[in-house]
Image: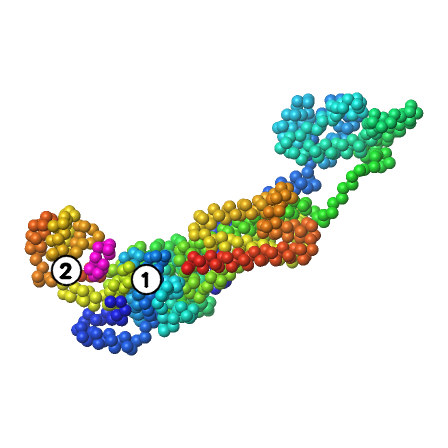
């Protein structure tokens, strides 16, 4: 399903045939800011990218989801030119970054680590990273105060970064990549390890950038974040894109009107229990005590499920039925390997 | 971008009091300690504490003991020696550097084969006893010429030819006159007899070094300590490269307008500036405290200091470019800086080293820098000689910077 093109989040409200037509028209009209074509790379014998293709458009947020080691960070590093691909090509605004060193200039990269100078103040960090990005001192005199205001850092401008909380350090980490107004912004786990307020502030910042036309490609393990923030997502696994599209569309395509069923059982099932669970359409997660599946709300019969499982020696502790979300999709696509 | 990197490193140094102290306070202090030690042990201020015990108490031995006590290059211990056993205790305990035991009158019992004067030293101060022995020999010859010739005549008679009674009588009269002359000289000008009353000197000493108010060791250690700290400070500051590589700043710089050469240029600029200021501080202290003559050859000194600081910066960056962690770089830099400094002459002058180590030292950049400074400020070496050494250091800087670039590129690959 890799490389299927852009699908707007508004697809939820359109009938399927109209949606396909609208997407086709949109793709024909828009030129991608970033095009990844058949990217492949290996670290020693381990293949980390295997024929990955995707397109990123101006004014959209694209989320790369996947378990650790799926190849998400490698893909980001390849797009910003930090990693030379073994095979494939990456184009920024139509220019290949392997052939034209300046092609990656419009790309801003926010690494997962807090990559700022801890001994400098917030303002000094922004100034220095602005200079590193090639912005003139004169421009920075205007843009640094504006960025401090926009990222909610104005009242911390004179504080050294080592004394800031994790959330504020993340904001500085992101802001430091925005001083040159990059047309393409790559973020590696931008909200990892921060509190809800800081997360919301970063979401607001990213949405603002998207609305201004910035093309944003981000990796995240936060599926709720991906669902509310991303216009499109891709699930990566073993260096490949397993699934790509707008979150609502992918959920609908996978689950339709079905609900997600989570069965919590008392003890790890024996062979007869496993056979029965699978017969009833349930699949294992990483935990042998948690199984999941899907069913239509009208046809779901909890009593019958309990009866059949009980006859196979499986005692149910808890049975939940809920609207599927990206977590459900993640489980469905990757199963037990997803870690959920 | 180069200046932005320079600014980041400068702010890092200014806000880290420990690093600031290491870079600019410790080097002058260490230099002052070294200079104070070596100014008094190898320069004009070398004054050994010499204990004297006169067991014979003859007129001659009293004169000799008085001459030793009056010798300006000696100083007396805090108490007089009481006995033969006591002077040994004084030397062993360090109360005296050397003891002189006058066992009998040097002009009596000349054929018994036993020396009348014994110089007692400790192996821990190996140079002290030979120095005092030589000085006592000189004093005996210069201040007691009558006693000296009396011994000489006795040897002539014993080993070469017997004198006639008339000759003996004439010699005795001459020796008596000589003794009176020495006594009169002692009363008038402190004991130095007229030139014609003394034997012709065998050895004449001549210093060919450029005379400045500073001693050779004090001048030497300005360069030696300077180079040691150039390496220490450069490797300490260059470790930010490892931090920046590990926390993603390095990648971030490269994904923007930066390239490995521009990053290295910014860091080199800072490290060279830091090193140059450090050298300037040490030599200013040397000039002010000890009168080391830096100003007459300031331009050449600047060239040598810039080259030495560049070499230290290049080597430090290369080391940090190849190390993966700060701990690894710390251990390796300590090892290399200490070995290079010891073999290169930063700790003890190379002329004191065994020949093989002196030869090895020529392959070490520390010794080039130390030699350049010493040549410039002590030996009055030609500009061409000094600048050739500076060029060698600049070449090291260039090669090391290229190696650093290669190391950084290798990490990224």
Report whether mark 2 lies on the same chain as mark 1. yes
Q: Where is residue B148 in the image (x, y as percent from the top left)?
A: 81, 29
Q: Position of residue B159 (x, y in %)?
A: 83, 27
In the picture, the disc for residue A294 is 2
Q: Where is residue A299 in the image (x, y as percent from the top left)?
A: 8, 61
Residue B382 horizontal side relative to residue B10, left or right: right
Q: Residue B81 in magenta?
A: no
Foreground: disc 2 or disc 1: 1
**Region in magenta:** A329-340
> To which residue does mark 1 refer?
A49
Q: What residue lies at 44% left-to-right and 66% top-to-bottom?
A: B257
The reply to whether dot 2 and dot 1 touch (C-beta < 8 Å) is no
Residue B320 horizontal side relative to residue B306, left or right: left
Q: What residue lies at 69% left-to-right and 50% top-to-bottom?
A: B379
Q: Which chain carries label 1?
A: A
Q: Can residue B100 be seen in this view?
A: yes
* Type of secondary structure dominating the magenta stretch: helix
Say if B6 sits above or below B54 in the image: below
Between residue B409 and residue B104, name the one nearer to us. B409
Q: Which chain carries label 2?
A: A
Q: Earlier in the sequence, mark 2 or mark 1?
A: 1
Residues packed near mark 1 inside 10 Å, few (<14), some (14 to 19) or many (20 plus):
many
Q: Residue pushed farthest front?
A: A45
Q: Can residue B270 be seen in this view?
A: no
Label 2 element class: strand
Colour mapping: rainbow
* Number of numbered markers: 2
Q: What quarter of the picture does the C terminus of chain B occupy? A: bottom left
Q: How far apart are marks 2 and 1 (CA)?
A: 31 Å
Say if B58 sits above or below B410 in the image: above
């Amino acid at each position: 399903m890799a490389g299927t093109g852009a699908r707007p989040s508004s697809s939820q409200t359109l009938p399927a045939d109209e949606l396909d037509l609208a997407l086709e028209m949109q793709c024909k009209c828009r030129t991608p800011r970033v095009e990844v074509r058949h990217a492949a790379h290996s670290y020693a014998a381990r293949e980390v990218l295997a024929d990955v293709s995707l397109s990123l458009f101006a004014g959209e947020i694209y989320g790369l989801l996947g378990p650790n080691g799926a190849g998400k960070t490698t893909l980001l590093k390849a797009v910003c030119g930090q990693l030379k691909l073994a095979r494939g090509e990456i184009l920024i605004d139509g220019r290949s970054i392997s052939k034209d060193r300046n092609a990656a200039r419009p790309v801003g990269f926010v690494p997962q680590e807090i990559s700022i100078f801890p001994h400098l103040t917030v303002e000094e960090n922004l100034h220095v990273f602005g200079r590193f990005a090639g912005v003139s001192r004169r421009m920075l005199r205007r843009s640094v105060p504006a960025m401090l205001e926009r990222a909610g850092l104005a009242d911390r401008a004179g504080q050294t970064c080592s004394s800031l909380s994790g959330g504020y350090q993340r904001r500085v980490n992101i802001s430091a990549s925005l001083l040159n107004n990059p047309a393409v912004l790559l973020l590696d786990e931008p909200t990892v390890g921060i509190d809800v307020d800081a997360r919301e502030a970063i979401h607001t910042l990213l949405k603002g950038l998207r609305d201004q036309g910035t093309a944003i490609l981000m990796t995240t393990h936060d599926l709720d974040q991906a669902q509310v923030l991303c216009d499109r997502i891709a699930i990566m696994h073993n260096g490949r894109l397993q699934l790509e599209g707008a979150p609502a569309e992918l959920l609908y395509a996978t689950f339709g009107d079905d609900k997600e069923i989570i069965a919590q059982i008392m003890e790890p099932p024996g062979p007869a229990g496993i056979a029965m669970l699978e017969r009833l359409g349930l699949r294992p997660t990483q935990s042998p005590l948690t199984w999941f599946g899907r069913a239509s709300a009208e046809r779901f019969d909890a009593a019958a499920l309990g009866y059949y499982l009980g006859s196979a020696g499986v005692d149910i502790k808890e049975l939940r039925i809920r609207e599927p979300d990206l977590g459900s999709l993640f489980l469905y696509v990757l199963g037990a390997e997803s870690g959920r | 971008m180069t200046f932005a990197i320079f600014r980041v490193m400068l702010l890092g140094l200014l806000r880290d009091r420990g690093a600031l102290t290491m870079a600019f306070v410790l080097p002058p202090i260490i230099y002052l300690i070294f200079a104070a030690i070596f100014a008094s042990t190898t320069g004009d201020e070398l004054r050994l504490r010499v204990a004297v015990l006169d067991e014979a108490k003859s007129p001659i031995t009293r004169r000799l003991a008085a001459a030793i006590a009056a010798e300006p290059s000696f100083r007396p211990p805090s108490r007089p020696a009481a006995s033969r056993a006591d002077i040994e205790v004084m030397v062993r305990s360090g109360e005296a550097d050397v003891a002189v035991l006058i066992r009998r009158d040097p002009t009596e019992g000349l054929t018994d084969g036993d020396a009348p004067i014994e110089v007692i030293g400790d192996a821990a101060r190996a140079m002290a006893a030979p120095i005092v022995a030589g000085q006592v020999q000189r004093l005996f010859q210069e201040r007691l010429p009558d006693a000296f010739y009396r011994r000489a005549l006795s040897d002539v008679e014993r080993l070469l030819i017997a004198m006639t009674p008339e000759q003996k009588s004439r010699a005795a009269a001459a020796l008596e006159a000589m003794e009176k002359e020495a006594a009169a000289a002692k009363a008038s000008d402190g004991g130095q007899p007229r030139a014609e009353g003394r034997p012709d000197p065998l050895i004449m000493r001549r210093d060919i070094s450029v005379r400045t108010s500073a001693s050779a060791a004090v001048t030497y250690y300005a360069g030696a300590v300077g180079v040691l700290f150039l390496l220490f400070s450069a490797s300490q500051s260059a470790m930010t490269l490892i931090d920046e590589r590990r926390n993603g700043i390095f990648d971030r710089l490269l994904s923007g307008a930066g390239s490995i050469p521009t990053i290295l240029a910014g860091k080199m600029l800072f490290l060279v500036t830091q090193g140059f200021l450090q050298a300037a501080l040490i030599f200013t202290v040397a000039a002010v405290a000890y009168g080391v003559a830096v100003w007459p050859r300031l331009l050449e000194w600047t060239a040598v200091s810039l080259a030495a600081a560049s070499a230290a910066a290049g080597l430090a960056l290369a080391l940090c470019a190849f190390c993966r962690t700060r701990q690894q770089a710390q251990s390796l830099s300590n090892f290399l800086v200490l070995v290079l400094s010891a073999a290169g002459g930063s700790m003890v002058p190379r002329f004191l080293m065994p020949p093989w180590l002196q030869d090895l030292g020529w392959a070490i950049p520390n010794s080039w820098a130390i030699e350049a400074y010493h040549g410039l400020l002590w030996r009055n070496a030609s500009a061409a000689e000094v600048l050739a050494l500076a060029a060698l250091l600049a070449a090291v800087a260039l090669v090391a910077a290229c190696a650093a670039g290669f190391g950084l590129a290798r990490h990224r690959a």
